[in-house]
Image (cartoon, rainbow, N blue to C red):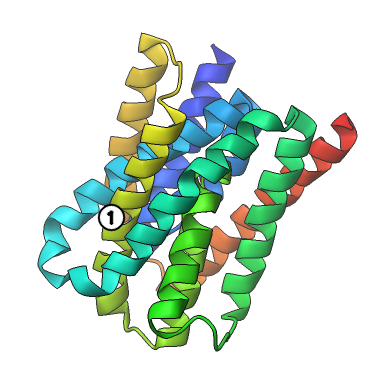
Amino acid sequence: MAGNVLLAGIVLLGSCVQWLTGMGFALVAVPALVLLLGPAEGVVLANCAAGVICCVGLARGWRLVRPRAMLPFCLAAACTVPAGTWMTRQLPEPWLLLVMGGLVTVAVLLVMRGARVAALRGTRGALFAGAAGGFMNSAAGVGGPPFSLYAVNAGWTVREFVPNAMFYGVIVNAFSVASNGVPELTGTQWFLVCAAMGAGGVIGRGLASRIPEKRARLLVLLLALTGGITAVGKGLWGL
């Protein structure tokens, strides 16, 4: 029972910050889901939930999506998702926790710095970001940071970034679910996950007008950083 309550709480928090800031479900939820359910189940649940949230978010802004600009991201992600899935099936759990926690930690630090990388521009940069995002999404459930870094280096505005990030989230999570499968949850757990996603959306949208965006984003990144470091610590303890 306690595990189910914790599961619902993690999903609720992730959904809340996603609607509050436009990002962050996977960064916040994946480390905790991995610790609660194990690497494989935690990642595929994050893929499913993040994909659904992106679908709902995209319903309002799909007219602002730039399909031609998104094509390189999606093609590259389709090529690397299977590699991420293969890796998660080969490594023992302690090593998976190390890899996932490390990827989350590094991704958060890069996003916090707003790293400027000349290679993350143009079509070549889109292919690199899409490939890195596809691999990271299927292996660790966090495919958004490479896309975010590309957007920073390309000088995209928030108005451009959000709908295209939602579109990319739908595609890369669909690829990941097709490759990884769906999590093996009980009917009760599925009900709690769906209810928590809905409640988190309502809370997040309600708080969006009350909390400054910069402060909310910093909180999301700090939560994600804490989770990533915790996963790394548990991985090291298990070796």
Q: 227 or 75: nearer the eye? A: 75
Please determine whether, in this image, residue 78 is positioned above or below residue 161. Answer: above
Q: 63 or 189: nearer the eye? A: 63
| Secondary element type, mark 1 | helix
Please determine whether, in this image, residue 167 is positioned above or below residue 8. Answer: below
Q: Residue shown at 50%/75% (left/top)?
A: 149
Left or right: where 14 falls relative to 198: right
Left or right: where 144 falls relative to 172: right
Left or right: where 158 falls relative to 184: left
Q: 180 or 159: nearer the eye? A: 180
Residue 113 at x, y percent in the picture: 62, 79
Q: 47 or 76: nearer the eye? A: 76
Q: Residue shown at 27%/45% (left/top)?
A: 202
Please determine whether, in this image, residue 78 is positioned above or below residue 119. Answer: above
Residue 33 at x, y percent in the picture: 57, 33
Residue reaching furthest to the left: 63
Residue 233 at x, y percent in the picture: 82, 43
Q: Quadrant of the C terminus?
A: top right
Q: Residue shown at 37%/22% (left/top)?
A: 192
Quick check: can you spot residue 17? no
Q: Residue shown at 19%/68% (left/top)?
A: 67
Residue reaching furthest to the front: 79
Q: Quadrant of residue 230?
A: top right
Q: Quadrant of the N terminus?
A: top right
Q: Quadrant of residue 163?
A: bottom left
Mark 1 crowdedness (10 Å alpha carbons): few <14, some 14-19, many ≥20: some
Amino acid type shown at disc 1: Arg
* Residue under pointer 1: 205
